[in-house]
Image (cartoon, rainbow, N blue to C red):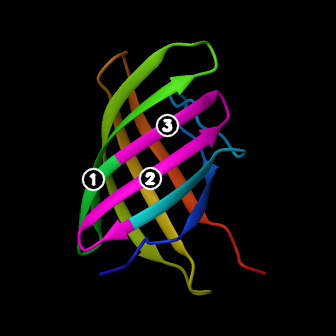
Amino acid sequence: MLNLDGRLMYVSCSAERGVVGSDTRIFFTQKGTRVLGRYRGGSVERGCLVGTVTGATLLFRYVQKEASGELHAGSSICELKQLEDGRIRVLEHFRWSTREGQGTNVFDEVSSD
């Protein structure tokens, strides 16, 4: 099982219906199978995701306050992959629950170089 604890990620690819972007940063903590992520950037003022990881699958729900002042939420099913250089990539398939739409975002771990 890949461990997300202490990992900082950025959005390397954003869905058409998504509101995160390349300046969005996500910081993960993990205890056992429980995962917490805090994020901001793009049009997201502040966001939080809570979920569980099993093997290479991360399931979570998210809520975020956007720069417009609106609150939005949804759920995601993610595939976790380890890249050749040791960083982790998250392929997120999300579905909004507070607005229309769904899509796929890609998060890549920020290199420690």
Up the image or down, 56 lies above or below 105; here it is below
Quadrant in which the N terminus is drawn:
bottom left
Residue name at image x 42 percent, y 36 percent: 103
| Secondary structure, magenta segment, majority class | strand
User: Which residue bears the numbered disc 1?
Assistant: 51
Q: Earlier in the sequence, mark 3 or mark 2?
A: 2
Few, some or many C-alpha atoms within 10 Å of disc 1 (few <14, some 14-19, many ≥20)? some
Report x, y in % for residue 11: 61, 50
Report x, y in % for residue 97: 29, 23
Few, some or many C-alpha atoms within 10 Å of disc 3 (few <14, some 14-19, many ≥20)? some
Label 2 SS? strand
* Residue 85, magenta (yes or no): no
Up the image or down, 20 lies above or below 89; here it is above
> In the figure, residue 10 lies in which quadrant?
bottom right
> In the figure, residue 107 lies in which quadrant?
bottom right
| Gap between marks 1 and 3 measured at Cα | 14 Å
**106 displayed left or right of 113:** left
* Residue 43, magenta (yes or no): yes
Up the image or down, 18 lies above or below 67; here it is below
User: Which residue bears the numbered disc 3?
Assistant: 47
Residue name at image x 24 percent, y 75 percent: 55
Name the amino acid, label 2.
Gly
| Gap between marks 2 and 1 measured at Cα | 9 Å
User: Which residue bears the numbered disc 2?
Assistant: 37
Few, some or many C-alpha atoms within 10 Å of disc 2 (few <14, some 14-19, many ≥20)? many
Name the amino acid, label 3.
Gly
- Report the magenta residues as a range: 30-49
Label 3 SS? strand
Number of numbered markers = 3
